[in-house]
Amino acid sequence: MRYTNWQSFGADGAGGVRKPFAIAALALVLIGLSLLGSESIGTLALAALLLGVALLVVALRHHAQPGQEQLEALAARLNTDVESIKDLQWEIREREMRYRDLLDHQDEVIARRDADGNLSFINDAFCKTFGVKRYDALGEPLDLPILSSDSGQATGETATGRSTRVIELTTTQGPRWFVWEDFVLPRPDGQACEVQSVARDVTEQRASELALAQARDQALTASQAKSQFLASMSHEIRTPMNGILGMTGLLLDTKLSPEQRTYARAISSSASTLLGLIDEVLDFSKIEAGKMELRPTPFELSEAVQGVVELLAPRARDKNLEIGWIIAPDLPRQIVGDEARIRQVLMNLVGNAIKFTEQGSVTLKVSRSAETLSAANTIVRFDVTDTGPGVQPEALERIFAEFEQADQSPVRRHGGTGLGLAISKRLASAMGGDIQVTSRLGAGATFTVELPLDIPAGTPLLGDVWPKPMPGINVLILLDGKAETAIARDLVAGSGALVTCATSDEAEAVAMRAAREGAPFTVLLTDMPNAEHVAAIKPYLGCAPEEPGPRVVVTIDPGEREAYAALEDQSITSYLVRPVRPVSALTQFFAPHHQAAEHVVHRLNGANQASASRGAVAGLTVLLAEDNDINALLACTVLQKAGANVTRARDGADAIAKAKHALEAGPGFDLILMDMHMPMVDGIESASRIRALYPESAVAGAGRPPVVALTANAYAEDRASYFAAGLDDYLAKPFDKKELEEVVARWHDDDRSQTAGVA
């Protein structure tokens, strides 16, 4: 295009159009182009643009000069641009309509405010929710009809300019709850920002959450009520159960006919079974309520296992079952854990094994797991193995479930709640371990417990403190029981000594052959049925260096102690009481002769410790605060038979008065047994007021009488609360006469200050 043609373009000519006409046309074109960027006056801009182009075309047609073709090309190009602009304008309007339709069809309430806080956009949901018309609301401030707000669920404005709050608003459908979100919309052209609000109706969701929270609170309340009910029922049941068991025990101490004794033992056994069921239900309710608290402390691992096996041994002997245990020498002497809960798990597993095994044996093996943690931690493995019928494969999956038993048929022989294994499983899990079972039908089962436990610093291994064999020690085992033989063999082999097992038919020949080969047996372990073979075997036995002769050790049942004197005539040097303790066996096998003899004397004296403690009760003055007549009769009878002088108080107030009177008249009582639940004044308050009668410097057993809590509350936390309240000892109902005598004797011994607080 030649721009020199513009000089003649505006001149007056035959067409009569002047230069200002063309300038105006170009101005309209430029104005139209500039106004197209504004959404609000887009139509006016398009009109101005079209008018300017039209005028420019007219001017060009009436002034055909030398550059006319170029100008006509420009006009055509402008027409094309105008069409493109019209298409663009249509597309913008189409997008705007789609955007508005999209927002209008949203369920959420959507509004937009300008920099002055006035509404610049609202969707249909906004209009329907608050009952307003769009054109009435636009340009007006946003005034929310807020009824209330949930400040607990509100969040402040974030770095991105977004804020959220939960509010209740008045709507056309009544009060409704909304999650209201505000966020800033920055403008790319640098103009003032707008704020867009999106509100989501959460009325139904909130109602569901409130209903769920209410249901949860009700469930917690119900759970607490259930736990309280079970604790209360336990107390109410255990109180008369104390009378049943206690009076039955007293009855069995009297002269009875064989028939009467059978009936009395049946009563005692049934009451003990019922008490065990109550304890299982209580333990399960505690676990369900989340009240099971672990109390890890250092304890002797072998002593704990030994206590479990010895406690359950009479039940096994009643069924003619072998029962024994062994512990690996590479385990630490002490571990840190909740001894009571570990014992409970083992009691459940060993007790179950005895219950379901009709012949054969039950053994407990304790070892260190192959998975070693560190020098300060170890995984202790407990294997309880029986020779019972085994577990059906389909029952293995449900055997640890609550209220489930392996045998659920109507003809099942063994009762129970089905909670023992479930409780054991949960206790093991709470201690960070687990329980698994392996079984082969008809060949018994093995329950394996693995527990990660800490090791106290400086504690030695069991093998380091057990007696060790001297050179030349060789042990011959002649036992009838397969389980007892296997345990003894593993124990001796684990100590590093030579060991050989033989039957009664081959024992003499085995001993003779060993003597001929120059390696005679120095220790013979046998039992009562094989004691008759000792005379034939002993000539072939050898003697360890610096020993007076070979050692012949016999295992006996607790009821066979009287036969030991007769066994001495058959050259029996010592005996081991079943279930055999590993340390006792190794002492008799390997310890110097004088130490082994002292160990036997110690065990004999231990059998008479109960009678010795009963003698220590004689002459004591005891205040018994008990409102239940039967329990009071039981305790008074036991204490009086032991030689104590008993004064009974029927309630807390009576106990305080009698304690005060005894103190004014003399030195006061030697011991106070205090029931915790009494009318007028309870046990804790009574104990506190009685202690106040003595100087503050007085301690239990030295300056004031110890106060022992008598209670049917079986929870460990109850015991802890009693100690925290200032009571000195604890005796749970139902208790037998031995337990009562031991508690009384504990505080009458000269060493009572060292045993305070131990039940």
Image (cartoon, helix red, strand yellow):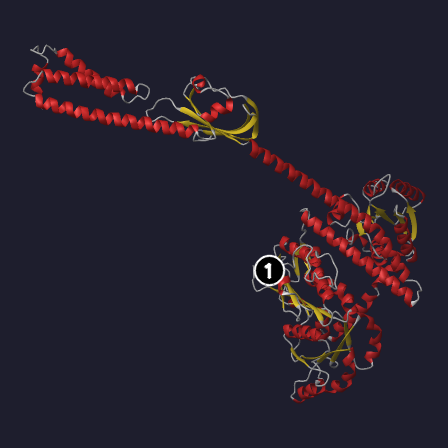
Is residue 225 visible to us here? yes
Is 258 situated above or below 179?
below
Which residue is labeled 1 in the image? Answer: 378
Mark 1 residue type: Thr
Give how far across and how far down residue 418 sits, in percent: 70, 57
198 to the left or right of 664 = left
Q: What residue is drawn where x is 22% and y is 19%?
A: 50
Q: What residue is drawn where x is 34% and y is 29%?
A: 95
Looking at the picture, tell me which residue is in the foreground, 612 or 252. 252
Give how far across and how far down residue 366 sits, in percent: 65, 65
276 to the left or right of 329 = right
Looking at the picture, tell me which residue is in the foreground, 609 or 339. 339
Looking at the picture, tell me which residue is in the foreground, 517 or 290. 290
Looking at the picture, tell me which residue is in the foreground, 684 or 1. 1
Is 404 situated above or below 592?
above
State the image quarter where residue 52 is shown. Answer: top left
Q: What residue is drawn where x is 70% and y is 60%?
A: 408
Give how far across and how far down residue 757 sits, in percent: 77, 51
State the image quarter where residue 271 is shown. Answer: bottom right
Secondary structure state at the residue bearing disc 1: strand
10 Å crowding of disc 1: few (<14), some (14-19), many (20+): many
